[in-house]
């Protein structure tokens, strides 16, 4: 069965809601009220992954929570490589939320000689040239990129050639990856500009 | 003319590409090659806002850049209020990229007594209770939220009642705003979980 990629962020939201639920049983309607998705949508999303609840009885909160963790791959910790320790990279390195969610930034890379060899947040900054050897030896599959636009594609290519399979990209660049590699983009300036567009349009 | 909201992030990308272009004139085909959007799409997106280029001649790079800045509302600086100075809020406060793009975090708010009154990155942390008086007096229209899920809706309601018109929300919560207020959500855990879902599925 082909699972639509739009189901996954919804499953993340169902999981978030379950975390704060006290009731031992939850209905799809309750989940709908709490997440903003429709009850039918929720039943459909969950059905892709198996038969969890009992029709008319709802879902066992704890069991569903554990199943969703497994589906999302967050029933384990993940080592992460962070490339680009500029303003945003430093902020991401300091962001403890990643660790709380099981994402351990294990290696940090930059190409700035003034930064290489120093430690930030207890993590040594390594030369970007060492990506192939370090990543291959570590077996890490996940990377976060916060490099300038001009070097983003080179960094991605190096990461993918070294075995990285999933990339969260904060560089404001349109990047290509080969099949079998997942690339997601977050561009903070683009988000902020959606807001300023909205604000200035309403003034015009 | 109704401008589709999907045009705006594309216009942000065209603008980014123009920033690094040296040629005085650029064709929609060149912009297409650099941004990954189609040339016809680019002409359509720009046509919503006026007649910029000359058919068959392309666009004047500098003139188009200035026009896109105006469209996106980034031909001026914006004062921003940041609410929630936890792990992520602190990282956002330290992120200098906002300032480089004309977004000045002018006020920071938290409800933690240990933080209120202290300064971070040169910005005083104020009591969240003072949002109404401070925001109303300042006339700020833009806010970034990095509070826990449980308090996110209350914070949004307070901000909107105080005159905030555009919100970038990092809280993992489904939030409601009234008409005339723009709310955008960035949930880093959801993005990371899209990646771990992909990684674990390929292992299964």
Image (cartoon, coloured by chain):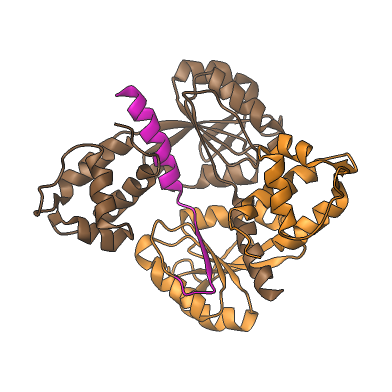
Chain colours: A orange, B brown
Q: What is the x, y in percent for residue B100?
A: 37, 45
Image height check: is B151 above or below B32? above
Asked if residue B160 lies left or right of residue B104, the reply is: right
Inspect this view and state whether residue B116 appears.
no
Q: Residue at 46% across / 77% down in the picture? A: A158
B85 or B62, nearer to the observer: B62
> Residue A199 lies in magenta, yes or no?
yes
Q: Residue furthest right?
A: A24
Q: Say above or below: A141 vs A21.
A: below
B149 drawn magenta: no
| Residue A171 in the image, given as x and y percentages of width and height | 43, 58
**Magenta region: which residues?**
A177-204
Q: Is residue A33 left or right of residue B1?
A: right
**Quarter of the figure with residue B74:** top left
- Residue B91 horizontal/vertical position (percent): 56, 47
Count of residue discs: 0
Using residue B69 as the reference point, say whether residue B113 is left or right of it.
right
B175 and B94: which one is in front? Answer: B175
């Amino acid at each position: 069965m082909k699972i639509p990629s739009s189901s996954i962020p919804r499953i993340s939201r169902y999981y978030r809601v379950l975390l704060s639920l006290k009731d031992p049983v939850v209905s799809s309607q309750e989940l709908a009220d709490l997440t903003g998705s429709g009850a039918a949508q929720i039943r459909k999303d969950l059905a892709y992954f198996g038969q969890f609840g009992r029709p008319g009885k709802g879902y066992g909160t704890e069991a569903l929570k554990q199943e969703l963790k497994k589906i999302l791959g967050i029933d384990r910790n993940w080592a992460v490589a962070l490339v680009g320790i500029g303003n945003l990279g430093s902020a991401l390195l300091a962001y403890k939320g990643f660790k709380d969610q099981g994402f351990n930034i294990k290696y940090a890379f930059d190409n700035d000689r003034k930064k290489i060899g120093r430690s930030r947040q207890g993590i040594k900054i390594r030369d970007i040239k060492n990506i192939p050897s370090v990543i291959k030896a570590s077996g890490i599959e996940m990377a976060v990129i916060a490099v300038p636009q001009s070097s983003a594609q080179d960094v991605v290519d190096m990461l993918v050639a070294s075995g990285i399979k999933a990339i969260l990209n904060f560089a404001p660049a349109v990047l290509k990856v080969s099949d079998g590699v997942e690339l997601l983009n977050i561009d903070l300036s683009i988000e902020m500009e959606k807001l300023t567009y909205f604000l200035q349009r309403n003034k015009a």
